[in-house]
Image (tube, rainbow, N blue to C red):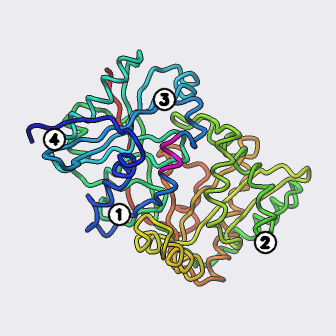
Amino acid sequence: MENIIIKEVSGRCQLRKFIQFPNRLFKDVPTYIPPLMFDEVNLLTSKNPSLEHCDLKLWLAWHDGKIVGRVAGIINHSVNERWNKKAVRFGWFDFVEDYDVFEKLLNTVADWGRGKGMTEIEGPFGFTDMDKECWVIEGFDQRQNLSTLYNPKYYIDFITRAGFEIPCQWAQYKIFASQPIPEKVGRLNKLILEKYHLRELKFKNRKEVYPWAWKFFHTINDSFKDLYDFVPMTEKEIGVYIKQYIPFVNLDFVSFVADENDNLVAFALIIPDLNEGFKKAKGRLFPFGWYHILRCLRHFTDIDLLLNGVHPDWQKRGVHSIYYAAMSQSAINHNVQWSYSNPQIIGNEAQRIWDTTYKADPMMKRAVFKKAL
């Protein structure tokens, strides 16, 4: 494709075009899930507290007066400092099936990064690990999670052709949700609770969750601190994610395990399958998007395993089995058919018992890519 023009995004009108581009590009793809417009605006403007430690640039690719691609360039200074690197990230990277468009957008991010003293480029990443990241490399036709990126296969063909390497891979699983809890798991969990003086937290209303939500995200910071490129979330970032995720949580699918001093030692946060609601909303809550999402919150047969983990001080003591069993029982109570895991780094599977205790099927693999500048 000739005469491709790359322009930096400026103004609210162009920002809306930037956000809406993949909705048009993938409008006929059944597995694509449009994000909510206001969530994207909050991420890509000064409302995002991550911009206190990140630099951001947005570009659109134009051809004959039409948008043919988009990309965000991000320099996360906290990540670079923590991991002793000089990396510029690409994210929000979508483009038509044309290598020239892909190359021009990627080179724009690379040139910006070089100008800022960066020595490598990597992605797709957001600002934090709570943002959508990593592309599918296997299982392109599989169902997407609400919190994951969609990409067609040609994205991988192009990034490989450009000489990028894969430094880290993730796996996702499809788990039969309403399978009985093995008797040995029930006995083991009872022993663990008694031995370590732990308790499972139950919530009657959403207001009770919010004080624990802060502990929840701090426990994530501790639990995930050694994972690839992870950097702890700031207090402001945590506040944003609490507002973003807690309203979608079904209280029956919140499993927190606390010690006798009210420290959170293990957690599982699960949301109903909202895919169909978000598809029908088409990125907008109004006038009727809220109705479709609310309906999915109340009537669902599948669930997304949004976040789960164990505090480092409590790993390898079996406490992860407690919230797995609690989630299985809730699935049985709600007649849930399938649960879908979020991406989990391959090689960091010590907390997963699906392969040995519960029936689980590999669904897809994902990866990020990097290259020296």
**Badge 1: few (under 14), some or many (20 or more) residues near its Cα, within 10 Å?**
many
Query: Disc 2 on helix, strand or loop?
Result: loop
Badge 3 amino acid: Asp
Q: Which residue is mark 3?
A: 55
Query: Disc 4 on helix, strand or loop?
Result: helix
> What separation in Å lies between label 4 and label 1 (alpha carbons)?
22 Å
Query: Disc 1 on helix, strand or loop?
Result: loop
> What separation in Å lies between label 4 and label 3 (alpha carbons)?
27 Å
Q: Is residue 44 magenta?
A: yes
Q: Left or right: where does residue 344 sit relative to residue 122? A: right
Callouts 1 and 3 close, C-beta under 8 Å: no
Q: Is residue 337 magenta?
A: no
Badge 1 amino acid: Tyr
> What separation in Å lies between label 1 and label 3 (alpha carbons)?
28 Å
Q: Which residue is mark 2?
A: 205
Q: Which residues are magenta?
A: 41-45
- Give the label on residue 32, or none: 1
Residue 6, compared with residue 342, is above or below; it is above
> What separation in Å lies between label 4 and label 2 (alpha carbons)?
51 Å
Q: Which residue is mark 4?
A: 99
**How far from the left and from the top, in percent, is residue 195?**
87, 56
**How far from the left and from the top, in percent, is residue 104?**
21, 33
Q: Earlier in the sequence, mark 1 or mark 2?
A: 1
Query: At x 13% / y 46%, what residue is drawn?
Result: 64
Q: Earlier in the sequence, mark 4 or mark 2?
A: 4
Q: Left or right: where does residue 337 sit relative to residue 189? A: left
Residue 342, compared with residue 279, is above or below; it is above
Secondary structure mostly seen in the magenta stretch: helix
**Badge 2: few (under 14), some or many (20 or more) residues near its Cα, within 10 Å?**
few
Q: Earlier in the sequence, mark 4 or mark 3?
A: 3
